[in-house]
Image (spheres, rainbow, N blue to C red):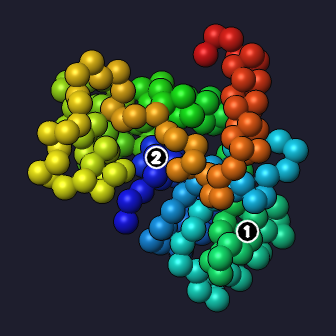
């Protein structure tokens, strides 16, 4: 299955969430899709929130309902699938900001990278930090995004790389994407930039 950039990059920070959220995420493995919004549910404004799709059984649904009552998470049904919503804390909003801009190298501080690193992520983090030749990481992200075979890699332009992946397209990162939620995400981005001029 092709994974979006929320799944590949921003989803890393889910491991930094409170232990009860992490426990729930372990229960609903494998996670099939992660988004940063849902166009059908957009209210007056957009707030950075994960929308997580996974196979959920009755036992897990009990845990989800309990955490929803405690205001730790939310959930809804979308096309007969349960989607868990997890608000992204303010402390991670700068990560979301850089993610939206496709600035993967600015997303995670060295301190956060130390908390998240494992042997499977060394190449990814080296690419985030622009260490060494990261064009192979770029090629793998593009191939995975567009379901390309290894024999098609030569079509991918790796000249003048500034990041290890192309910027996210909101239509791939938001469930039921529409112009209303696009406008709300752009407004959030612009407001965040205005408040954080040093970013």
Residue appearing at x 40%, y 34% in the figure: 166
Q: CA distance from mark 2 to mark 1?
A: 22 Å
Task: Look at the picture and state if 147 lies above or below 103.
Answer: below
- Please tell me whether mark 2 or mark 1 is closer to you in this view: 2
Q: Which mark is residue 101?
A: none
- Picture quadrant where residue 136 is located: top left
Task: Look at the picture and state if 15 lies above or below 93.
Answer: below
Residue appearing at x 33%, y 32% in the figure: 164
Indicate the quadrant containing the C terminus: top left, top right, bottom left or bottom right: top right
Residue ranking furthest to the bottom = 58
In the figure, is residue 154 to the left or right of 146? left
Q: Which residue is mark 1?
A: 75
* Residue 142 in the image, given as x and y percentages of width and height: 31, 44
Residue appearing at x 58%, y 80% in the figure: 56
Whether residue 68 is visible: yes
In the figure, is residue 87 to the left or right of 33? right
- Near mark 2 (Cα within 10 A), the count class, few <14, some 14-19 or many ≥20, is many
Residue ranking furthest to the top = 198
Indicate the quadrant containing the N terminus: top left, top right, bottom left or bottom right: bottom left
Whether residue 64 is visible: no
Tell me which label, 2 or 1, sits earlier in the chain: 2
Q: Which mark is residue 5?
A: 2
Residue ranking furthest to the right = 44
Residue appearing at x 65%, y 69% in the figure: 83
- Picture quadrant where residue 138 is located: top left
Task: Look at the picture and state if 160 lies above or below 30.
Answer: above
- Picture quadrant where residue 165 is located: top left
- Near mark 1 (Cα within 10 A), the count class, few <14, some 14-19 or many ≥20, is some
Q: Element at badge 1? A: strand
* Residue 65 in the image, given as x and y percentages of width and height: 76, 76
């Amino acid at each position: 299955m092709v994974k979006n950039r929320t799944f590949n990059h921003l989803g890393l920070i889910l491991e930094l969430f409170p232990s009860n959220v992490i426990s729930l995420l372990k229960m609903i493995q494998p996670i099939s899709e992660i988004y940063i919004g849902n166009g059908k549910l957009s209210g007056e404004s957009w707030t950075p929130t994960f929308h997580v799709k996974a196979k959920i059984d009755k036992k897990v649904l009990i845990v989800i309902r309990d955490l929803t009552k405690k205001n730790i998470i939310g959930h809804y049904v979308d096309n007969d699938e349960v989607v868990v919503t997890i608000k992204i804390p303010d402390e991670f909003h700068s990560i979301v900001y850089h993610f939206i801009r496709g600035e993967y190298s600015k997303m995670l501080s060295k301190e956060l990278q130390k908390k998240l690193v494992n042997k499977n992520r060394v190449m990814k983090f080296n690419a985030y930090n622009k260490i060494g030749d990261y064009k192979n990481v770029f090629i793998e992200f593009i191939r995975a995004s567009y379901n390309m075979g290894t024999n098609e890699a030569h079509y991918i332009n790796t000249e003048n790389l500034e990041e290890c992946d192309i910027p996210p397209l909101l239509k791939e990162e938001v469930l039921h994407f529409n112009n209303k939620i696009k406008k709300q995400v752009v407004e959030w981005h612009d407001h965040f930039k205005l408040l954080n001029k040093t970013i």
